[in-house]
Image: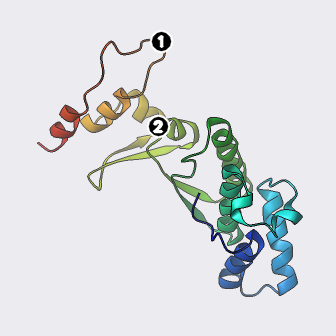
Amino acid sequence: MTALNPVQTVGRQLNEVLELHRPELSKSERKATCLDMLKKVRIPLPEARLNEYPHNLSGGMRQRVMIAMALACKPDILICDEPTTALDVTVQASILGLMQELQQETGMSMIFITHDLGVVAEICDDVAVMFAGRIVEQADVFELFDHPKHPYTERLLGLIPDIDNPPKQKIDIKPITEAMFR
């Protein structure tokens, strides 16, 4: 929500990315690319949005602008650090769907950094679970969810609410943390 500069228009910020990372483009090519990128990430009324400031946009549209900025550089790998934080479930689903479509269209790889296991299950092929700054388990997403091997992964997956069987008591995570440091 705060990655965009609040005192610069969306168009200026997109243009700056192109000036820095694609210097071969002329001014008119940069403007056309900015417009094309906003269309690609499905920003409504993209021509008007180029002249707007971030505070004029919803959270989902700001997220789309950030995706457009990242994709304007034509990356081979896109690193997404908590890309759906603070978005409601509907907008989150829309953003994830858009990112998957753009990934298929461009052939880029994506690295998702998230604590949201729902996002992991939805979008990831392979998963690396980190604890205390180290990878403690790495597996195919289905294998990891079905057969976790590390105690931290087991406990982490155990914290996912089961709407069919709600917990009878509050879960205390202190023993989980203590067990990991033994």
C-alpha distance separating marks 1 and 2: 18 Å
Q: In the drawing, what numbered circle is on residue 164?
A: 1
Which quadrant of the view contains residue 53? bottom right
Indicate whether 19 appears above or below 37: below
Amino acid type at image mark 1:
Asp
Q: Tell which residue pokes out farthest to the left in this image.
A: 182
Image quarter in which the C terminus is found: top left
Q: Position of residue 156 (x, y in %)?
A: 34, 34
Judge from the rendering whether residue 39 lies leftward or rightward of residue 69; answer left or right: right
Q: Position of residue 20 (x, y in %)?
A: 65, 84
Tell me the residue that label 2 is attached to: 117
Q: Earlier in the sequence, mark 1 or mark 2?
A: 2
Judge from the rendering whether residue 27 lies leftward or rightward of residue 124; answer left or right: right
Q: Foreground residue, 13 or 57?
A: 57
Under circle 2, the secondary element is helix
Indicate whether 72 appears above or below 172: below
Amino acid type at image mark 2:
Leu
Q: Position of residue 83 (x, y in %)?
A: 56, 52
Judge from the rendering whether residue 117 lies leftward or rightward of residue 136; answer left or right: right
Which quadrant of the view contains residue 21? bottom right
Indicate whether 142 appears above or below 109: above
Residue shown at 76% from the left, 87% from the top? 24
Residue shown at 68% from the left, 69% from the top? 74
Residue shown at 26% from the left, 52% from the top? 132
